[in-house]
Image (cartoon, rainbow, N blue to C red):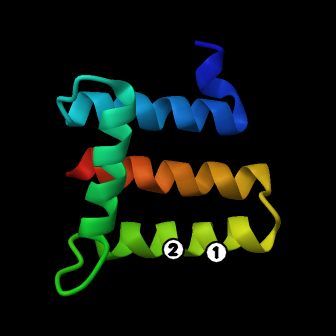
Amino acid sequence: MIIESLPIVGSCYGLVKKSVNVYTASSPVEAVQMGIVGVFLNCTPPVIKYPILCANLMVSGITAVATGGNPLAVTSTVNAARMIIAAD
């Protein structure tokens, strides 16, 4: 699909699609909310379930903020969250 190859839009589409596949929710919005909660729970102490993926998410998130929303950094942040959801 063309939408999957666009920098930020494709990553967000992949995040929604993966969230819907992983979490059986009644709507994509609910699935994304559950996905974000899942990422938060997997990346906070006392047990960090995926330390390398969580470190990648943190670094890419900081980079996205520091660069003022650079499309490459935002895409990397969304992809890191998608990988954590997929691993769950």
Marks 1/2 in contact by CB < 8 Å: the verdict is yes
Judged left or right of residue 53, residue 13 is right
Describe residue 83's horizontal placement relative to residue 5 as left or right.
Answer: left
The answer for how far apart the CA atoms under marks 1 and 2 are is: 6 Å
Where residue 25 sits, quadrant-wise, is top left
Q: Residue sitting at 49 percent across and 69 percent down?
A: 56
The circle on residue 62 is: 1
Q: Residue at 53% across / 50% down in the picture?
A: 78
Mark 1: few, some, or many residues within 10 Å (few <14, many ≥20)?
A: some
Instruction: Identify the residue shown where x is 20% and y is 51%.
Output: 88
User: Residue 51, position in %: x, y?
Assistant: 32, 76
Determine the secondary structure under disc 1: helix
Query: Tag 2's secondary structure?
Result: helix
* Residue 16 or residue 87, whichever sits in front: 16
Q: Residue at x 65, y 26 (%)?
A: 5
Q: Amino acid at mark 2?
A: Met
The quadrant of the rendering that contains the N terminus is top right
Res 55 → quadrant:
bottom left
Circle 1: residue type: Ile
The image's mark for residue 29 is none
The residue to which callout 2 is attached is 58
Residue at the extreme top of the image, as rendered: 1
Disc 2 residue crowd, few under 14, some 14–19, many 20+, Cα 10 Å: some
Relative to 15, say whether 43 is above or below: below
Label count reads 2
Above or below, 17 relative to 50: above
What percent of the width, then of the height, locates residue 72? 73, 52
Residue 31 place in picture, x, y as percent: 30, 36
